[in-house]
Image: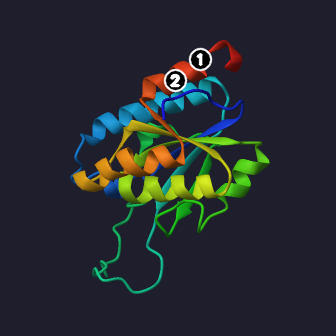
């Protein structure tokens, strides 16, 4: 679905742009993803709209078919990238599941601020971003996905999420199109 509108109180959710994941191999250059996230953050700050910075520290319990890493994460692994320019009034949540709503108070924090819509960016498209977008949709938020501000290590997962899942959860568009909607007179 093409971008049509942003609600007056829309929050930006930036998923897992943290130090420990920057060494991973992604299908799009991570520097480009960080730059686009920075551009979204700057636009949301300019309009005094909420920003949620999400990091991941661990995994949900339970058995899986794929083995999990049993090693201790290095110091600083969960540190949000300094390029995001974290501010004291940002919402910061640490998740231990793929989605940021299931194991945190993110929904309550957004509702307290009157948020009715979220814009999503970050990594990985087919896990952290998609799971968080699904949970936002299920919680009743309007969802917009900045598809050029996300990436994945798995090309098939990235492409499948963008082509098949995201259009069912909300509207998709490029970073600049989202910023253009924010900059319309209705948001000034």
Counting from the top left corner in percent of width and height, residue 177 is at: 47, 23
Q: Secondary structure at mark 2?
A: helix
95 relative to 46 in the view: left or right? left
Front-most of 188 and 7?
7
The x, y position of residue 56, in whole percent, is: 46, 62
The structure's colour scheme is rainbow
Q: Is residue 3 left or right of residue 117?
A: left
Please, is residue 46 above or below residue 79 in the view? above
* Nearer to me, 86 or 4: 4
Spatial separation of the CA atoms under disc 2 and disc 1 = 6 Å
In the rendered image, which quarter is residue 47 located in? top right
Residue 28 marker? none
Name the spot of residue 52 as percent of width and height, x first.
Answer: 58, 46
Look at mark 2 in the image and give the residue it sits on: 179
State the residue at coordinates (59%, 67%).
Answer: 102
Tell me if I can see residue 124 in this picture.
no
Query: Where's the C terminus, which quadrant?
Result: top right
Residue 187 point in image, percent of width and height: 68, 20
Secondary structure at badge 1 equals loop
Farthest residue toward the top? 185
Residue that badge 1 annotates: 183
Residue closer to the observer: 2 or 130: 2
Left/right placement of residue 165 relative to residue 114 reads left
Q: Is residue 109 visible?
A: yes
Asked if the residue under mark 1 is in contact with the one under mark 2, i.e. CB atoms within 8 Å, the reply is: yes
Is the residue marked by circle 1 packed among few (<14), some (14-19), or many (20+) residues within 10 Å?
Answer: some
Residue 171, above or below 155: above
């Amino acid at each position: 679905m093409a971008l049509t509108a942003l609600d007056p109180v829309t929050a930006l959710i930036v998923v897992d742009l943290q130090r420990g994941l920057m060494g991973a191999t992604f299908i799009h250059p991570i520097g480009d993803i960080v730059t686009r996230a920075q551009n979204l953050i700057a636009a949301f700050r300019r309009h005094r709209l909420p920003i949620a910075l999400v990091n991941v520290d661990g995994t949900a319990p339970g058995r899986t078919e794929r083995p999990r890493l049993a090693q201790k994460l290095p110091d600083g692994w969960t540190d949000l990238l300094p390029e995001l320019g974290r501010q004291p009034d940002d919402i910061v949540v640490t998740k231990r599941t793929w989605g940021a709503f299931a194991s945190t108070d993110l929904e309550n924090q957004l509702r307290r601020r009157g948020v009715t819509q979220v814009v999503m960016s970050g990594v990985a498209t087919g896990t952290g971003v998609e799971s968080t977008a699904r949970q936002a949709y299920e919680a009743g938020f309007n969802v917009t996905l900045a598809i050029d501000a996300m990436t994945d290590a798995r090309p098939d997962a990235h492409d499948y999420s963008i082509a098949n899942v995201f259009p069912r959860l909300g509207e998709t568009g490029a970073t600049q199109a989202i910023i253009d909607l924010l900059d319309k007179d209705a948001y000034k």
